[in-house]
Image (tube, rainbow, N blue to C red):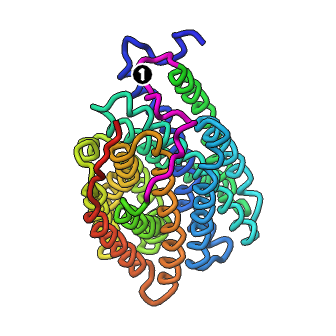
């Protein structure tokens, strides 16, 4: 491949920014669309299919269980294939699953679909995070920004979903199971994102081969990315991140349903969701300095605490300024919690342990997400409604903040 195809040696920083932005489409496909768009479609699907809140939450619990399976499967796949290849295969599979989503109404099939979608999402999100960490290693001064840009791609997926879903539902008005058209539109977005990801993977493979000086440290190659480490050394960070998984997913699963139950107009709800996505995209610049500065659990603790406040707010008041502030704060924080764990791994572990470190965080994250949606849905079906479920989610996030605050930096930092 010619040098014109890879990052320009004359402008390596600009090349890394560009690559991080395109790579962020992996987060857009895996989380922003494949997972979080479900929250937008939950109300019409629940009305059409007669789901309880507990069953609606169980759909995301199934998705989280699939994510856990994917997190366990990813290290095995990385022993046999490059991260970029695993990411592209996962993105293509996720796109196909989205495309067939509207073909079924059976509850059992939907639970299986959400399970499979969670598995493919994990393959994309984990390998994308690993590639982002490698990319950041070539530019330590902007490492937090580069990692944050990858995770901020989730916001692009959220905002695009907020724009596409209402249009698709409007076009399908009067049709049986009109929500199926929205799933098809979202699948199209996933296929486009997967195509663009192929370009980013090719550029990173070229950099790995030595085409761009300093882009990827040699110690971070696929063959050395799976070395084990003692998990007890960062047990508090893992526990804090697990509670984040329990708490945040209730908000992202049920916030649209809550606002609808509180009487908010459909257009206002979609604007709220789109602005939440914009806040996610803006979050990397807000928190990059924090992620670069600290090697201990303080960033995770602070972000969990802020997220708890954002989660509690709409349970206490349905006033538009309160709801809007909740969505913007939530969006500006929640993916930076994920980025904070990748930054922690980069700060505290050698490159040979990055994949195993990211995988450990992903497993506890997935475990938390398995618990959260079903618990919130079960509570919402009771006398307290969704508001009480959001209070429980906020408490989980604050417990996570306390746990993360106890995590210290490891003695050995990554080079």
Instruction: Say how many tags the image has.
Output: 1
Q: Position of residue 89 (x, y in %)?
A: 67, 41
Q: Is residue 143 left or right of residue 153?
A: left
Q: Secondary structure at mark 1?
A: helix
The residue drawn where x is 27% and y is 49% is 295
- Residue 69's place in the image compared with 382, above or below, is above
From this viewpoint, is residue 162 visible? no
Q: Quadrant of residue 329?
A: bottom left
Q: Position of residue 413 (x, y in %)?
A: 31, 43
Q: Position of residue 197 (x, y in %)?
A: 58, 33
Main secondary structure found in the magenta portion: loop
For the N terminus, the quadrant is: top right
From this viewpoint, is residue 100 visible? yes
- Give yes or no for residue 217 being in the magenta stretch: yes
Q: Is residue 321 left or right of residue 23?
A: left
For the C terminus, the quadrant is: top left
The residue drawn where x is 43% and y is 58% is 230
Instruction: Say few, some or many: other residues with alpha carbon within 10 Å of mark 1 (under 14 / 14 to 19 / 20 or more).
Output: some
Over which residues does the magenta segment extend? 210-230
The residue drawn where x is 39% and y is 56% is 272
Along the line of sight, the residue nearer the viewer: 331 or 222: 222
Along the line of sight, the residue nearer the viewer: 349 or 335: 349
- Give yes or no for residue 304 being in the magenta stretch: no
Q: Position of residue 252 (x, y in %)?
A: 46, 63
Along the line of sight, the residue nearer the viewer: 152 or 40: 152
What residue does disc 1 label?
15
- Residue 114's place in the image compared with 184, above or below, is below
């Amino acid at each position: 491949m010619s040098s014109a195809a890879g990052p320009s040696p004359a402008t390596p920083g600009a090349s890394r920014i560009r690559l991080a932005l395109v790579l962020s489409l992996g987060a857009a496909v895996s989380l922003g669309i494949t997972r979080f768009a479900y929250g937008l479609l939950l109300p019409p699907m629940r009305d059409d299919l007669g789901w309880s809140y507990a069953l609606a939450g169980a759909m995301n619990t199934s998705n989280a269980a699939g994510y856990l399976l994917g997190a366990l499967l990813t290290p095995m796949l990385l022993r046999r294939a490059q991260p970029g290849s695993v990411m592209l295969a996962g993105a293509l599979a996720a796109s196909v699953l989205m495309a067939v989503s509207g073909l079924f109404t059976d509850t059992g099939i939907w639970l299986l679909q959400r399970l499979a979608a969670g598995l493919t999402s994990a393959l994309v999100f984990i390998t994308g995070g690993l590639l982002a960490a490698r990319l950041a290693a070539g530019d330590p001064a902007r490492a937090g920004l580069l990692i944050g840009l990858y995770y901020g791609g989730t916001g692009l997926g959220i905002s695009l979903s907020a724009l596409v879903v209402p249009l698709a539902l409007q076009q399908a008005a009067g049709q049986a199971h009109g929500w199926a058209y929205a799933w098809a539109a979202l699948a199209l977005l996933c296929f486009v994102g997967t195509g663009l990801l192929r370009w980013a993977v090719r550029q990173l493979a070229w950099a790995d081969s030595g085409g761009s000086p300093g882009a990827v440290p040699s110690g971070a190659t696929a063959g050395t990315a799976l070395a084990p480490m003692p998990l007890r050394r960062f047990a508090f960070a893992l526990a804090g991140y697990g509670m984040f998984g329990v708490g945040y997913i209730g908000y992202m699963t049920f916030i649209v349903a809550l606002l609808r139950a509180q009487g908010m107009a459909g257009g206002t709800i979609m604007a709220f969701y789109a602005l939440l996505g914009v806040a996610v995209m803006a979050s990397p610049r807000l928190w990059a300095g924090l992620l670069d500065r600290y090697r201990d659990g303080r960033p995770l603790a602070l972000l969990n605490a802020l997220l708890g406040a954002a989660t509690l707010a709409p349970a206490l008041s349905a006033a538009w300024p309160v709801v809007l502030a909740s969505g913007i704060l939530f969006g500006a924080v929640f993916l930076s919690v994920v980025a904070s764990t990748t930054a922690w791994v980069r700060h505290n572990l050698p490159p040979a342990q990055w994949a195993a470190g990211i995988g450990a965080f992903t497993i506890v994250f997935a475990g938390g997400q398995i618990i959260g949606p079903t618990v919130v849905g079960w509570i919402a079906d009771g006398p307290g409604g969704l508001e009480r479920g959001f209070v429980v989610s906020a408490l989980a996030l604050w417990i996570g903040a306390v746990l993360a605050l106890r995590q210290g930096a490891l003695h050995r930092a990554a080079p």
